[in-house]
Image (spheres, grey):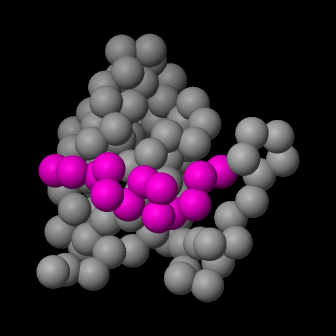
Amino acid sequence: MASRRSFLVAYDIRDPRRLRRVAKVMQDFGARRQLSVFICRITGAQRVEMQRRLAAEIDRSVDQVLVLPLCERCSPALDAIGIPVAANDEFDDTIIL
């Protein structure tokens, strides 16, 4: 089994149609944490596929997607003020491609 890594993906998409398409792509790869923020626990191949699909949906001149790696030490320490963040184990098995 390929090893998985955690990533925080945040995006700013200017067009509502593109925004919906980007959100739909992200639902295939991770768990939504805020409107435009997802946490993904994915393999290297899944990351390549996710980034390929996102690149096909955005307008690079006005949109931005950030893919930030979360190290194994800092990922469990993810914290929130307000609505709590689910632990990684709660959504690891829900990411199915």
Can you say whether 38 is above or below 59 in the image? below
Question: How far across and down, in percent of the image, does residue 61 sit?
Answer: 43, 37
- Quadrant of residue 5 within the rendered picture: bottom left
The foreground one among 76 and 45 is: 76
Answer with left or right where residue 1 lies relative to residue 62: left
Q: Quadrant of the N terminus?
A: bottom left
- Quadrant of residue 23 within the rendered picture: top left
Question: Can residue 6 be seen in this snapshot?
Answer: yes
Q: Is residue 34 magenta?
A: no
Can you say whether 24 is above or below 41 in the image? above
At a point 75% along the width and 59% down the height, the residue shown is: 79
Residue lying at the far right in this picture: please name it. Answer: 81
At a point 61% along the width and 84% down the height, the residue shown is: 73
The foreground one among 14 and 95 is: 95
Answer with left or right where residue 13 lies relative to residue 47: right
The foreground one among 61 and 30 is: 30
At a point 68% along the width and 64% down the height, the residue shown is: 78
Q: Which residues are magenta?
A: 85-97
Question: How far across and down, in percent of the image, does residue 68 sit?
Answer: 52, 65
Residue lying at the far top in this picture: please name it. Answer: 16
- Quadrant of residue 22 within the rendered picture: top left
At a point 47% along the width and 64% down the height, the residue shown is: 89
Can you say whether 97 is above or below 68 in the image? above
Question: How far across and down, in percent of the image, does residue 8 sit?
Answer: 52, 58
